[in-house]
Structures are given as structure tokens and as C-alpha cells.
Image: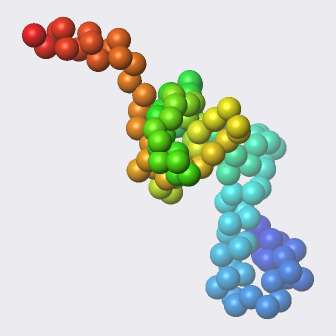
Amino acid sequence: MLKQVLARQSSTTVWMSPHEKLCKAMFTINFLNCSFENMRPPVVRHFNSGNQFKLSQCPLVMIRDPETWETKGPYELVTWGCGYVCVATPSGLRWIPQKWVKPFVPKIQLQQKGIRGK
């Protein structure tokens, strides 16, 4: 199978080193090929398998607006990564630095925690 993949890729990998050709062929075999038993490629199975990473609901967050330096919100958290957070604002989606985002805690919850602590 490896020889077949290398032969099919020979026209597009002319400029690559033998090591790069082998890496590309192995990537194709391991991640992009479908079998007759399972028509989903392994890369799709890998990234769609973990339901624990998907948000079932969008938590509310407070943000510091980088233009006015005011705290605004609560807004729905869409996604996050690499030090930035994407929130859904009325004007559309915005990417905000993660250090300017805090979870939204309603005042009712804060008052209940204060009563329990006494």
C-alpha cells in the first residue's frame, strides 16, 4: 500500500526530500484513507470522537472592551484558544484577549453564598 501511495504522489512530490515524501505518504495512509468497513476517514473520527470537548451551552462572560476599557456584558462565549476568546456581542463576533474575560456570576448567586457563609 505504501508503494502505491508513493507512486500516486510522485508527480506532486518531485521537489520533496525522501523523508518528506515518506511523511506525506504515511499521513495519507493513516489519516485520509477510508476503508469499506468505515467510510469516515480516521481524521474525522479522531476530531469528532470527544464529546467532552464540545460545549453543550454557551456560558456567559464579562469582557473589558479594548476600545473604551469598560467592562461590558454578559455575552455568550463562543470559543477560545491561543490566548484569545471569541464572544457573541450584539454587533457580531469579537475576539478578545483572554486576560480581559471573566466568567459572569449573577448577583443572586453571590448573595446566596454570603448567606451560607455566615
Residue 6 lies left or right of residue 49; in this view the side is right
Quadrant in the picture for the C terminus: top left
Name the residue at 47% across, 42% down: 70
Please tell me which residue lies in front, 52 or 32.
52
Name the residue at 71% across, 73% down: 24
Residue 2, image x, y percentages: 74, 71
Residue 3, image x, y percentages: 78, 76
Quadrant in the picture for the N terminus: bottom right
Residue 59, image x, y percentages: 50, 28
Name the residue at 86% across, 81% down: 12
Q: Is residue 22 above or below residue 88?
A: below
Residue 47 lies left or right of residue 41; in this view the side is left
The answer to whether any part of residue 100 appears in the image is yes
Name the residue at 71% across, 39% down: 92
Please tell me which residue lies in front, 65 or 59.
65
The answer to whether any part of residue 52 appears in the image is no
Among the 4 quarters of the image, the one containing residue 18: bottom right
Residue 32, image x, y percentages: 75, 57
Among the 4 quarters of the image, the one containing residue 103: top left
